[in-house]
Image (cartoon, rainbow, N blue to C red):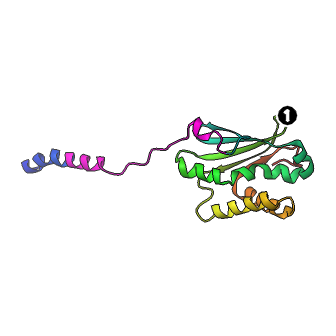
Amino acid sequence: MSRLRRALLPGTLVLALAAAGGCDRPEELKLPAAGDLAGLYGDGPAVTLNGNVVDVEVYQPADQLRRGGATWAKVGPFIYLFSPQTKELFESWSGVGGVRVTTTDGRDRMVARAMLPRGALNSLTWPRALNLVGKARLEGTRRPSYILDLIEYGEETAEFEYSERYVKGGS
């Protein structure tokens, strides 16, 4: 190697390292604090952070489960999972890897559980999910087909499981 090349080599390395330091670094993943989660889904649900998964626990009244049977047991988690609040969690907190909703009965037994991983819905599919939830909440008792549509969409989109106590065959 010539003297000129040996003399330029350290300077070239310094320039290369300086240029690499100026490259864009990935965004730091951010997670919500307990205060950010409190009341997010209203007064009833308990919302906590478990690793990078937001856990939402919702009590489902016994009369609702008696009246609606397996259909209402199944739809419970999807009502909260496909909500504007869940969409906001994903948009506001880059470190949230998923949202898991568990509905429980009066004895703290699981009725149903569903988890929506980050990226399962996008800018094209979120509007449909929100529309299905809106119809199910507003018109579901008069038109049960809206509830069934939401259940079908939820089962296609999210990870889910049902208690054998409320849904024959469970998952």
Q: For the residue marked with disc 1, what is the amino acid? A: Arg
Q: Residue at x 24, y 49 (%)?
A: 16
- Write down the residue under mark 1: 107
The single residue placed furthest to the front in the displayed view is: 43
Asked if residue 164 lies left or right of residue 12, the reply is right
Magenta residues, start to end: 14-40
The single residue placed furthest to the left in the displayed view is: 3
- In this view of the protein, which residue sits in the foreground, 165 or 143? 143
- In this view of the protein, which residue sits in the foreground, 44 or 18? 44
107 to 169, vertically: above or below: above
The single residue placed furthest to the right in the displayed view is: 66
Q: Residue 128's x, y, as percent?
A: 68, 64
Q: Residue 70's x, y, as percent?
A: 88, 51
The magenta stretch spans residue 30: yes
Asked if residue 14 lies left or right of residue 79, the reply is left
Q: Residue at x 71, y 45 (%)?
A: 101
